[in-house]
Each structure stands twice: as C-alpha cells, then as structure tokens.
Amino acid sequence: MSAKKTRRPAASGRRRLLALCLVGAAVVVALAYRFSRTDRNAQPLPPDALRGSNVLLVTIDTLRADRVGVYGSTAGLTPTIDAFAREGLRFDRAYAHVPLTLPSHAALMTADYPPRNGVRDNGTFRLDASAQTLALRLQATGYRTGAFLGAFVLDARFGLNRGFDRYDDRMRGGGSEIEIAERRGEQVLTPAADWILGEQSAGPARQPFFVWVHLYDPHEPYSPPEPFRSRYSGAPYDGEVAYADAALGGFLGRLRSAGALDRTLIVIASDHGESLGDHGERTHGLFAYEATLRVPLVMWSAGRIRPGVFAPTMRLVDVAPTILDLVAAAPLTGVDGRSIRPFVAGERPYDDPGSYFEALNANLTRSWAPLTGLLREHLKLIDLPVPELYDLSSDPRESTNLYARAPEAARDLKRRLDAVTRAAPAARSNARIDADAEMRLRSLGYVVGAASKRPRTFTVADDPKRLVHLNAALDEADAAWSMGDANRAIALVEAAIKERADFTLAYDRLAHMLAASGRRGDAVAVLEEALRGGHADTPLLRSLGTLLADAGDAKRAASVLEPLVAQDPSDLASADALGRTYARLGRTADAETLFKRVLTASPNAVATWNNLGALYMVANRSADAADALRQGLAINPDSAIAHNSLGVAYARLGKIDLAVAEWRRALELRPGFPDAEFNLERAGK
Ligand SMILES: [Zn+2]
C-alpha cells in the first residue's frame, strides 16, 4: 500500500487532516503513544473528523496477536495488516472478553460485556431482539449496511443480523452438518466488494457504507489453500493466517483501485486468539490466557488518523463507541464500552476501567467451574476454584501465579470483577430445559433438569486447569475419528465420561460416533444414560430425537423434540430436526410449517431448503420441490445431492434436458455418485 497520504483539504478554516493522537499534555498519554515525526505538529482530532466516512470492520477469527508482524511476529504472515497498522493507529494491548466467536462479536457489536448483552456461548445463545448495536446505530444514521460472514456460528438466527440491510451468511459446507459450515476468505470478500462497489455506483446520492466482513480461515481445521498449504506445511495455522491476510490484501486493493477507501475508516480486529498448546489448551474457549484473550486491533483512515501506537488497554467493547464517536453518530448509551478517542487524542488522561472476561463454555456444556476474570493495568485475575493472578508486565506467558503473594491486588480486582457480574443476570442458555419441557419429557421416562438445576458449589476438582486433560482427550478422539480409527476414538470418549460423569458434551460426541459406526442402539443408550444422570441439555435431547428418528422410531423422536421446539421458538436446530421427523411421519403440513419458520429466521439455512425440497418431492409437489432446491443451490451450488434431487424434480415435470444437466453437474461434483449415474442411465444419457 502506498505511503502517500490523501489529505482532505481544510474545510471552512478548520484543520481537519489530523490525527487521532495528540500531543501531549497528559504524561500517561505521552508515554503511551508513539507517533510519527512528520505528524508531530498535528492538532487534536475533533470528534467529527471522520463524519460521514464509510466504515469497514474486518474481523479475522482466531487470529492470535503474536502472529501479526506489527505485534512482534517475524514470520512475515501479515503484510496487509502490517501496512495498514503502520499507516494507522495500532492498539498494542487490545482485549477480547470471551474466547468464542459469537459472544466475542456480540460484545464488540453491542459495546456490552457478555453478562449484560446475554450472549455467553456459541450455538445456544442469541442476542436479544431489543439489543442496540453498532449496525443499528449506523443504519439509523443513514448508512447502507452489509455483513459478510465466514461461518455458521454467526448465522442470522443468532441475532447479530439486526441493523444490516444485507446479511450474507451463505455457507457452502455440505450435508446436514450445517453447524460446522464455513467458507473461505475470498468467498466472503468477493460478494462484499461487489456489494460495496455496486452500491457505490448506484444512484446519485452518496450514502456511506458500513460493511462488516468476517474471515474464519485461521479457525480450525487448519487447511489453507495452495500456495499457503505447501509454504507452511509444518505450521498450517500460520498458513491460514497468511492466506487470510493475502485475501484481505486483494480485497482492499480492489476497493482502493475503485476509490472506495478514500473516505473510509477501516477497523481490523480479531475476536480471540488461539492457544496452540499454551497451558495445555490446543484451540480456544476453555481458558482465558493471553494467547486467546489478547487480540490485534488496528484503525486506519487515509490522512485522518495519524500513525501511532496506543499502549494502554483497549477493549473490544470500546470499538463500537469509538467508531460511532469518530463518524459523529449517536452513541450507544448505558453500555460497558466507551469511546477511546478522547484518550488517544490526549483530551483526557487515560484511566483504566479494567477489562472483564469470561469463558463459560466448559461450565455450560460439561459442568466445570465457570471462568470469569478481570484485567486491569498489568494485573490479571482469573477467578476459579484455584484462583490465578498474573503480572503481565513481567510475566506475559502467565507462568507465575501471584495470587497467594499479592492478596491486596487480588482483592481489588475481585471487587471490580464482582461489580461487573453483580450488575447482570446469570447466564441463561437456551440449552436449559424449562419446567414445561421437563414435565413432558418426564412422561417419556426421561429425567431432565432436576439434577443440573441443583445449586452447586464448584471445588478444586472442577477447575478447568485440573480437567484440561479431558479436553485433550476429546481432541485426541476427534483426531482419531478423522483418521478413521473409530474404535480408538470411541474408547477415548468413553474413558472421559467414566472420569467425569457430568460431561454432557462427551455423551453427545460419543453418541454421534456410535451412530456413525452403525451402532444406533448403543448411541441411543448412551444418551438415555446421560438423561438418567440428569446431564441433559437441549443439544443432547436434540441428538436423541434425531437418532430415534433415524433408527425408525419417529413417533418417540417427535415426543422428544416437540417440547424443545415449544419451549424455545428461536431454537431453529430443533425445529429443523422436528420438521424432518414430521416428514418421516407423513405429517407434510406440520413439517412444512416448521421448515418455513426456520427459513424466515435464517434465510440462508441451506440444509433446511434441501429438507423442504425433499419433503415436496415425497409429497409429489415437484414444482415446489424444484423451487426449494434451486433456493438451496443458489446458496450452496456445490451440493451434489441437491443437484441430483433437482434433476429428479425436473424429470417429473417433464423437463428432461434440465434434469440431465443437473445430474451431470452432480457427477462433476461427486464423480461416481451412484444416484446420479443411475438417473442418467435411465434417461438414456
Ligand atoms: Zn472466533
């Protein structure tokens, strides 16, 4: 990228080409902020210096700060981010609040910590429909708003779609495993650039854009495309980082050539890092050490943000208030975050409010002790049965627990932490079984809820530090499974359950493995054992319902799934599973209602379009089937099964040429696909 600055001419005598940072009166700020020599005479940035600018928010999932060049990596993985960081404002100590994708983005978008915005985990939480967000604010200010997502975990159904004119969550992943679906960076960025440039040229009245692009590539599985795969064959995570950065470079280059970056504020951040083995954690979500909590964060706007580095703590909840401040939009009120602009500009001396964090997935999915904590100045408290206190200035790797040695400091942080958690309601997961559902399930002989609802005190034995080996065992089982060693995978998960009987997630995993190995009866037995032990949650019951249906007991399956759908209409995964079950029972109208409900809330749910198509096929509604399948293929054109089914629908409608084209396409996508071969043979092609 060019080092040249495009400076806006001074307007009405006011100097507006200024940088965020200012000169320094306040000692803290002067120490905190290094800025380039050329801009030393710049004046303070007025709050509206970026008024009306476009806003481009880039989040790169799972990007660990120390893999980025300007954060100290010498591997050269991130030339794009580095270039923008050198021309922009880099936050050296930026922190996420949850090492998980949906809750971290929810905190960024709402400017509220998870206890207040209510989104505590992936999959089983959704952002409340009354929540105010960055997108809603900018939309109300007159921005065109578009979001382009890289993974199902940010699907519209989880509530971050509000405020976006376009919410592109079309995933190309296949089959029924929609929940792991993702798409490559370029598949996210190409439609985003098309949308930005299309909107830009449309109409005479210039309307600024707010676009959020989310690149999921560095998230596991680590399988970068060539040439990154070969270049980083020994470090595939690094390869994904390098790929994401290169894809971003291509995207920004295209926008720059089209002039779309001239009046644009770019914010590049990550939602959390990746442990890569630190503290015994392979990926992220269990702990909240620096590897996953500290994130890269850069703000850039040509000629309007002066290059520099902001050293004090910056929180992801501060991002939205800062953006709104910079573009002079109405602030989000009563939120945990604040605009960092006055501190960067030197208008106010920096005071550290502390940064809250939590990692509750292990608590919610396996009954381990809940992890919360607070980071302030250079001290970090992790509040667990075995509490931890670290001085990050002298011990950035968090190897020396100072908790016993510094009780005063620990108490101070604990007071501040309690103030955050006390002000908010307890985590309320949609995975919890409500009283009515509990009663209905009890009539089937399932005891749910009672045991898990018992108030419980967590002891040292429940500390995730003591249980991290079980996490590793589950990872090892997944690895064995993907290598085709089902017996070893199953044995590993069984051993984990033996050690920890309330390991809800492990029962679910085991049941899936057993079912996929053809042992459906054993799979059902495993889930029923978990239910008898009081370890059930919604995902586990949904798995049970699905398994029962697959095993031919659709009636009982419906009885398991119906209470889940009744207790939480926003639980689209259960609605989809019940729809498929009704389809098996021949209850076409009921199935259709459920599938349509899913598609209203999540229009790009490709598997549900395919399920609806299959339902219409069975009901001999070929034209409707063709419509639904075409909708699914518009979202994911790579599904051989959908192409084959669409071919059958066309054949039934007498459109043989169209049918043949679909079957041929199915065979291209999956050479040797027997159904497609059979259909072509029958058609004499
Ligand atoms: Zn993430």
Image (cartoon, grey):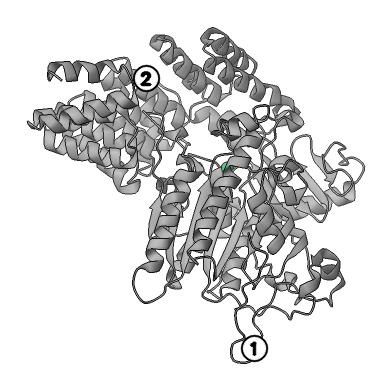
Between 648 and 490, the residue placed more toward the observer is 648
- Please determine whether, in this image, residue 612 is positioned above or below residue 105: above
User: Which residue ends up furthest to the bottom in the rendered image?
Assistant: 13
Check disc 2 and report the residue beneath it. Answer: 547
Please tell me which residue is depicted at 28% across the width and 26% down the height of the picture: 666
> Earlier along the polypeptide chain: callout 1 or callout 2?
1
Q: Is residue 205 left or right of residue 212?
A: left
Please tell me which residue is depicted at 54% across the width and 7% down the height of the picture: 487
- Please determine whether, in this image, residue 439 is positioned above or below residue 119: above
Q: Amino acid at mark 2?
A: Leu
Element assignment for label 2: helix
Between 646 and 32, the residue placed more toward the observer is 646
**Residue 416 figure quarter:** bottom right
**Closer to the observer: label 1 or label 2?**
1
Q: Quadrant of the N terminus?
A: bottom right
Quadrant of the displayed image that contains ligand 1: top right
- Which numbered disc covers residue 14? 1
Q: Residues within 10 Å of mark 2 (few under 14, many from 20)?
A: many
Please tell me which residue is depicted at 71% across the width and 54% down the height of the picture: 94
Q: Is residue 522 left or right of residue 344?
A: left
- Please determine whether, in this image, residue 400 is positioned above or below residue 448: below
Where is residue 49 drawn, in percent x and y?
61, 78
Q: Amino acid at mark 1?
A: Arg
Are the residues at dot 1 and dot 2 in contact (C-beta closer than 8 Å)? no
Q: Is residue 13 left or right of residue 53?
A: right
Between 450 and 34, the residue placed more toward the observer is 34
CB at mark 2 closer than 8 A to ligand 1? no
Please tell me which residue is depicted at 54% across the width and 42% down the height of the picture: 216
**Residue 170 figure quarter:** top left
Inter-mark Cα distance, 1 to 2: 68 Å
Where is residue 182 drawn, in percent x and y?
47, 38
